[in-house]
Image: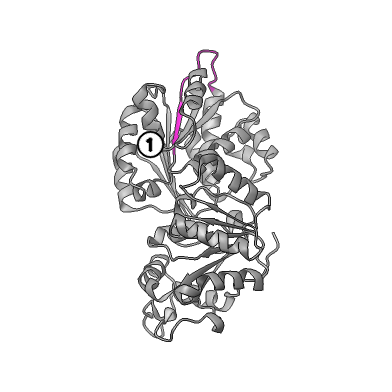
Amino acid sequence: MPFKSLGLCDELVRGILATGYNAPTEIQSQAIPAAIAGRDIIGCAQTGTGKTAAFVLPILHRLGQEQTTKKRVVRALIITPTRELALQIEKSVIGYGRFTHIRAVSVYGGASMENQVQSLRRGVDIVVATPGRLLDHMGRGSIDLRSVEVLVLDEADRMFDMGFIKDVRRIISAVPSRKQTLLFSATMSSEVKSLTAGIQKSPVMIQVGREFNPVETITQAVYKVQKEQKLDLLLHVINEHNMYSVLVFSRTKHGADRISKRLEKAGIKSIAIHSGRTQGQRVRALEGFKAGKFQVMVATDIAARGIDVKGISHVINFDVPSIPEDYIHRIGRTGRAEASGDAITFVSSDEHDQLRQIQRFIGMQIGVVKCPAFAAHESHKVDEVVPSLAEGSESGGEKKAAHGARRSRPGRRRRR
């Protein structure tokens, strides 16, 4: 199905084709016509399936059809939890809208407030913002939200996790009650559903794929290892399997820096990205990773949903995430746009509970790859953390688990 058939204007179709995309994804095919028709939307789809374009394109279409010569006012507001996501969305707006006259700006913490104020004063049609910095602008009167026609809440569940929900409610109260509201996320918690009930009117629910289930193109594996051997194991799997574009997740900023330094010492080009870095450092790190200057990028969860890099071959969870939803978003950095990828999780003896929660959350047991040189103590039985289902009843989750165990050769290099 071509983008033109979704009802998008010619200028937008030209912009889409110029970015290299030819056909919409499933979430885009379902969401774009409904959004163009003015419906409120709840869109839930796996990470990497094209949710950003699913809300950016109908906004550009709407604003492009009603362009005016009057002073520009903020007509669309997109709220997202991290600065990386804000920049990514702004880039999408600029790319798809290159043949329109629509202006957009992203506002987020860690960057010059004055530069953002000047951009807002010049007039913009679309603002992409993180909650905290947007409230700063609202407090000093440098942004006017009274003309907002479309409100987007991107990765709403993550905003709950990061404690932004009170800020989001304050922002919602500042925009007109009569507006179109689009909510998109990879997971849809009960808290998010309660939020939508109060701000949306008869929303269209779009569910692509099974919620909480990682994309089928990602091969998942667990390595059981003693905690003090994780760094050695990381070096081993990267070198042994010739991994070429690797994203490693650490639980802490200090841990990310320590991992990156160890990799550099071993001759592996590496860079760390986390909230302790300045915005300029984070942008340079991400651009360097995209350009292939670094073989490995080490990140904390704060950046998990803001990293959109084509061709990431492997995601390695150096530390098991404490929140199951974070596992979904971490491994979703590979296998994007229907490409294939590998996700590896190092599990030490004190991380049993986290792994158990993840496997219950995704409804399957992750296959274990044995590496004798780094094996944990015998009491560390990762492959038994999820109770087996009744014997003789092989459910879909069990089939996937068995399939994953057979396929768990995470080191193989993939063609993209």
Residue shown at 38% from the left, 52% from the top? 188
- Tell me if 216 is positioned left or right of 156 in this view: right
How is colour applied across the structure in the image? one colour
Magenta residues, start to end: 66-79
| Residue named by callout 1 | 132
At label 1, counting other C-alpha atoms closer than 10 Å, the crowd grade (few under 14, some 14-19, many 20 or more) is some
- Tell me if 197 is positioned left or right of 237 in this view: left
Q: Determine if the magenta segment contains residue 76.
A: yes
Locate residue 130: give its quadrant. top left
Residue shown at 48% from the left, 19% from the top? 121
Q: Position of residue 38 (x, y in %)?
A: 45, 33
- Tell me if 276 is positioned left or right of 191 in this view: right
The answer to whether residue 89 is above or below residue 407 is: above
The answer to whether residue 262 is above or below residue 307 is: below
Q: Quadrant of the C terminus?
A: bottom right
Q: Position of residue 214 (x, y in %)?
A: 49, 62
Q: Main secondary structure of the magenta part?
A: loop
Q: Nearer the viewer, residue 364 or 238?
A: 238
Residue shown at 42% from the left, 43% from the top? 81
- Asked if residue 201 can be seen in this view, the reply is no
Q: Amino acid at mark 1?
A: Gly
Q: Position of residue 275 (x, y in %)?
A: 46, 47
Q: Position of residue 1 (x, y in %)?
A: 63, 46
Residue shown at 37% from the left, 30% from the top? 136
- Tell me if 242 is positioned left or right of 130 in this view: right
